[in-house]
């Protein structure tokens, strides 16, 4: 069976009882905590900044997976590493110097990832794939939780997975947006290694059980 990780997205948590929600994540089978940073410029929404990430890191025992949806990510990567990021991902559409930024993140002993928007082809990663620990394939337009999964993403996943297998790389594929029990099997079959799930986890009646059901999905072979 294929191994994969589940990363609840804290954007969908109840911030009035953040500690409780993060304790739930600690007690669950979740592997990572996905943390969305939005600047109101790269995306039309603002979330929160470094100080809250620090608080989350002090409570959450899981790997902190920071997803920067911000312009000029080069200005902020070191402060997010200082705040507790274990995995740090920025958008290819937000910088002209992705290669340099990846080196910079890795030099701080943090896993480095690149996210791509729905309109961005996986081909733009051809000359940098070797350097990446993670590719975050957006399956919604970034900026908001609770949106509908864009099904065209499955073809992108298959294409990217094929490149990664052909080149014998360890790069993980993360899928972010609209992921839940209804489509997780298809997403894993198309090649995903990390499922980000916000609303489908935190807005469910029993988040711990939802995480455990996601973790329990069995995929024997990739559908690529
Ligand atoms: C979207 C964010 C996602 C979001 C996922 O801009 O990057 O990580 O939190 O939320 P759901 O799972 O509700 O689509
Ligand atoms: Zn995200």
Image: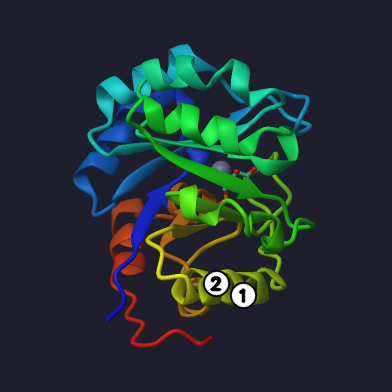
**Mark 2 surroundings within 10 Å by alpha-carbon count, few (fewer than 14), some (14 through 19), many (20 or more):** some
C-beta proximity under 8 Å, tags 1 and 2: yes
Question: Crowdedness of circle 1 by 10 Å Cα count: few (<14), some, many (20+)?
Answer: some
Residue 203 visible in the displayed image: no
Residue identifier under label 2: 163
1 or 2: mark nearer the eye: 2
User: Residue, x 49% and y 69% (percent of image)?
Assistant: 164
Residue 24 appears in the rendering: yes
Is disc 1 placed on a helix, strand or loop?
helix
Nearer the observer, 40 or 169: 169
Whether residue 192 is situated above or below residue 5 in the rendered picture:
below
In the rendered view, does 117 fall on the left or right side of 10? right
* Colouring of the image: rainbow
Q: How many labels does the image show?
A: 2
Is label 1's Cβ within 8 Å of ligand 2?
no
Residue at position x 79%, y 32% from top?
44
Q: Where is residue 105 in the image (x, y as percent from the top left)?
A: 45, 29
The answer to whether 101 appears left or right of 144 in the picture is: left
> Residue under circle 1?
159
Quarter of the N terminus within the rendering: bottom left
Q: How far apart are marks 1 and 2 (CA)?
A: 7 Å
Q: What element carries label 2?
A: helix
Q: Locate residue 114, reporting x and y percent.
A: 57, 45
Front residue of this view, candidates 61 and 42: 42
The answer to whether 43 appears left or right of 57 in the picture is right
Q: Which residue is drawn at 42% across and 49% down?
A: 133
């Amino acid at each position: 069976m294929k191994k994969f990780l589940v990363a609840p997205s804290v954007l969908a948590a109840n911030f009035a009882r953040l500690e409780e929600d993060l304790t739930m994540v600690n007690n669950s089978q979740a592997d990572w905590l996905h943390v969305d940073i939005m600047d109101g410029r790269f995306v039309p929404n603002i979330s929160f900044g470094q100080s809250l990430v620090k608080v989350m890191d002090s409570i959450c025992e899981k790997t902190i997976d920071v997803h920067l949806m911000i312009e000029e990510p080069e200005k902020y990567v070191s402060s997010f590493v200082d705040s507790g990021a274990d995995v740090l991902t920025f958008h290819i559409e937000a910088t002209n110097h992705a290669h340099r930024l990846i080196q910079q993140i890795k030099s701080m002993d943090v896993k480095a990832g690149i996210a791509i928007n729905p309109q961005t082809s996986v081909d733009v990663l051809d000359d940098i794939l070797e350097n990446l620990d993670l590719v975050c394939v957006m399956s919604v337009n970034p900026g908001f939780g609770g949106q509908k999964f864009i099904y065209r993403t499955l073809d992108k996943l298959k294409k990217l997975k094929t490149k990664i297998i052909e080149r014998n790389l360890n790069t993980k594929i993360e899928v972010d947006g609209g992921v839940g029990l209804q489509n997780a099997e298809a997403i894993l079959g198309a090649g995903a290694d990390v499922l980000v799930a916000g609303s489908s986890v935190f807005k469910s009646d029993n988040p711990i059980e939802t995480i455990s059901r996601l973790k329990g999905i069995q995929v024997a072979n990739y559908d690529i």
